[in-house]
Amino acid sequence: MTRLRNWITYGNVTATIAVFLAMSGVAAAVTLAPKNSVTSASIKDGEVKTPDVRGGAVTGAKIAANSGGSGKVIDGSLTGADVRDDSLDQNKLMAASVGTPELADISVVGSKIQAGAVDSRALADNAVGANDAKDLVTATSLGTVIGAGGAGNATVTCPNGGMVIGGGFAWQEEEPNSIVYSTPSENDPNHSWTVRGMVPAGSNTLYAWASCLNP
């Protein structure tokens, strides 16, 4: 009995079990899932993390519509190259979100500015010089004769489809007459200027003039 206890050691037991398993044909193996056999339903929610996804494996076609919002985009990770041409309009931009630093040099031309959107308040001091005003012209209307006690209008339209940026009036005779208003035309405020005057006595001729920016 003592000899048997001396023979039974951890190494002898382990070797005996290994021989038994080999002779019985029992073996342990790692089973791999067949290709494309793992579906979304096979994966527990939240188990797939960023390190589990191969770089470039997720494309636009694999993302559900409207599933990627601003909360899922890292600040500064999107550049102009990531945005499709003409895919952003003013309805998709937050108010005041685009300033001078976001605009490329010479990227804003006249056709991209709404009529009347730029006035003197939008221009820095000395921002417009003689070279910038080379297409500025003045147009004058035909005279409108107004009799005693009467009122009349004079309207001038900028030539060549130019945009009116200011205007005024003039009387032919230096007499005490009245001006009711001098303003962009109600019918065509972007291209015409209208003045209305009154003559209390005698008669006089009223003229309207406008400063126009050629297209």
Image (cartoon, rainbow, N blue to C red):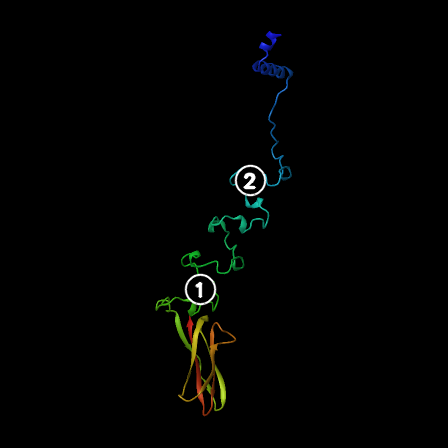
| Residue type of the residue flagged with mark 1 | Gly
Could one spot residue 214 in this view of the protein? no
Could one spot residue 181 in this view of the protein? yes
| Residue type of the residue flagged with mark 2 | Lys
Query: Residue 49, which numbered label?
Result: 2
Query: Residue 110, which numbered label?
Result: 1
Identify the secondary structure beneath mark 1. helix
Tell whether 130 sits left or right of 210.
left
Q: Quadrant of the C terminus?
A: bottom left
Tell whether 67 sits left or right of 163.
right
Q: Quadrant of the N terminus?
A: top right
Tell whether 8 sits left or right of 176.
right
Label 1, residues with CA under 10 Å away: few <14, some 14-19, many ≥20 = few
Displayed quadrant of residue 102: bottom left
Of 186 and 98, nearer the camera is: 98
Query: Residue 43, which numbered label?
Result: none
Does 72 appear above or below 38? below
Comparing marks 1 and 2, which lies closer to the viewer? Answer: 2
Q: Earlier in the sequence, mark 1 or mark 2?
A: 2
Residue 4: x and y in percent read 61, 9
Does 56 appear above or below 30? below
Find the residue positioned furthest to the bottom: 202
Residue visible at 57% across and 45% down in the picture: 61
Residue 204: x and y in percent read 44, 88
Does 22 appear above or below 120? above
Residue visible at 44% across and 84% down in the picture: 206
Does 71 appear above or below 90? above
Residue visible at 60% across and 8% down in the picture: 2
Identify the secondary structure beneath mark 2. loop
Label 2, residues with CA under 10 Å away: few <14, some 14-19, many ≥20 = few
